[in-house]
Image: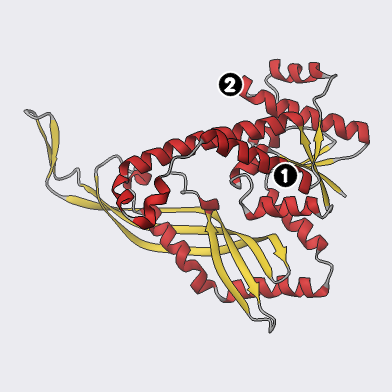
């Protein structure tokens, strides 16, 4: 059995309990295909992150309600303006976390009583998981890793660490296998457990169907990229001149790496690493046709010119494949870029 430590960054990326990947990891724990380890300090940090996210969300929600108050006049939207008790939300989410811990057979590891000097040595020597910045914020990570490492040594095991935190990813230990791409671990584990010939056939069938239905599947991705490009602020690093217009000339979308992140009988979910290439024309002021107005202290431009910008990047795309009894496969994009905007 694989022993697994899931860092708070993985929970947070999956909106704590909602994402398909965290649900599948917890399901594997429930089926005792993996043993999830959770240091007491990580449990406390999870609750802290949940509470902070609730506070931020309620502040945003309050701002929305204030701006959208006209909608209180309509019956279909009136209920959305009911008051929300933040303490009850936080308590309910803590209760959900506690339920998951029991349901997924997660083992809570108590605080270490010895060996704290090793953590402080790393702290004062600026070693991972500490940086030169706000070190106090990194203490929970340091004690979590120290706790897991001690547990592995005492029980003569190795533990898989799943994290998106670059400080944890660079932590060095012969007792820890650290994944900076936890989707790879999930893909490996699910393929390893797909013993039934039918499951293997379904996985292959789903992959083939995604490739065959590429044209339809990229439509929502294309719209997502178009919306992203309709923002001149993303080009400010490419052009200091005023941008008057943005014309999309080309968008290429390619499916690269497939990671299996959930399989449940006739429903299979892949996370597909998707390469995006685009070319846009920026209409900007032409410096050759300009003069400096001494009175108003500003440049006056008579003409515009065009500058072409070419860029590429990758984003994750979640694709659901549903397999009917006659082996017909229905595919759809269920999430793009983990439900977040692309970072500028």
Pointer 1 or 2: first along the chain: 1
Query: Which residue matches tag 1?
Result: 99
Q: Is residue 185 visible?
A: no
What separation in Å lies between label 1 and label 2 (alpha carbons)? 33 Å
How was the colour assigned to the protein in this rendering?
secondary structure
Badge count: 2
Query: Depth-wise, is mark 1 or mark 2 nearer the camera?
Result: 1
Of residues 198 and 180, the one nearer the viewer is 198
Residue 265 sits above or below residue 77 on the image: below
Q: What label does residue 134 carry, if any?
A: 2
Query: Which of these two is toward me, 330 or 173?
Result: 330
- Percent position of residue 125, x then y: 70, 17
- Secondary element at tag 2: loop
Residue at (63%, 24%) from the top-left corner? 131
Residue 178 x/y as whole percent = 75, 41
Q: Single out the residue that lies furthest toward the left.
A: 295
Using a 10 Å C-alpha cutoff, classify the residue at mark 1 as few (fewer than 14 neighbours), some (14 to 19) or many (20 or more). few
Residue 196: x, y in percent? 83, 71
Residue 251 shown left or right of residue 325 in the figure: left
Q: Quadrant of residue 257?
A: bottom right
Res 227 quadrant in image: bottom left
Q: Looking at the image, which residue is at 48% across and 54% down? A: 312
Q: Is residue 43 left or right of residue 153?
A: left
Residue name at image x 38 percent, y 54 percent:
77
Report the side of 158 relative to 12 (left or right): right
Marking on residue 111: none
Q: Position of residue 195 (x, y in %)?
A: 84, 67
For residue 113, side relative to residue 295 (left or right): right
Q: Is residue 25 visible?
A: yes
State the SS at label 1.
Answer: helix
């Amino acid at each position: 059995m694989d022993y697994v430590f899931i860092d708070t960054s993985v929970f947070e990326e999956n909106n704590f309990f909602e994402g398909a990947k965290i649900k599948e990891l917890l399901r594997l724990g429930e089926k005792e295909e993996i043993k999830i380890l959770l240091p007491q300090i990580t449990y406390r940090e999870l609750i802290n992150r949940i509470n902070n996210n609730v506070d931020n969300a309620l502040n945003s929600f309050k701002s929305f309600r204030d701006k959208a108050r006209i909608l209180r006049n309509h019956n279909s939207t009136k209920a959305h303006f009911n008051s929300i008790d933040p303490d009850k939300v936080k308590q309910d989410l803590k209760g959900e976390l506690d339920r998951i811990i029991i349901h997924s057979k997660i083992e809570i590891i108590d605080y270490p009583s010895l060996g704290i000097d090793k953590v402080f040595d790393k702290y004062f020597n600026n070693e991972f998981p500490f940086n030169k910045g706000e070190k106090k914020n990194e203490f929970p990570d340091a004690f979590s890793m120290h706790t897991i490492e001690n547990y592995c040594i005492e029980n003569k095991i190795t533990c898989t660490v799943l994290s998106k935190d670059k400080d944890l990813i660079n932590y060095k230990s012969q007792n820890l296998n650290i994944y900076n791409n936890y989707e790879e671990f999930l893909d490996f584990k699910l393929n390893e457990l797909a013993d039934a010939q039918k499951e293997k056939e379904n996985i292959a069938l789903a992959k083939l169907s995604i490739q065959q239905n590429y044209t339809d599947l990229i439509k929502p991705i294309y719209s997502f990229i178009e919306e992203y490009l309709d923002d001149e602020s993303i080009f400010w690093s490419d052009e200091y001149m005023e941008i008057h217009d943005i014309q999309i000339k080309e968008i290429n979308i390619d499916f690269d790496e497939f990671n299996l992140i959930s399989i449940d009988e006739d429903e299979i979910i892949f996370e597909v690493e998707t390469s995006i290439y685009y070319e846009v024309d920026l209409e900007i002021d032409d410096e050759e046709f300009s003069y400096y107005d001494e009175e108003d202290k500003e440049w006056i431009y008579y003409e515009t010119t065009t500058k072409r910008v070419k860029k590429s990047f990758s984003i994750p795309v979640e694709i659901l494949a549903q397999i009917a009894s006659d082996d017909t496969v229905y595919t759809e994009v269920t999430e793009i870029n983990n439900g977040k905007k692309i970072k500028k």
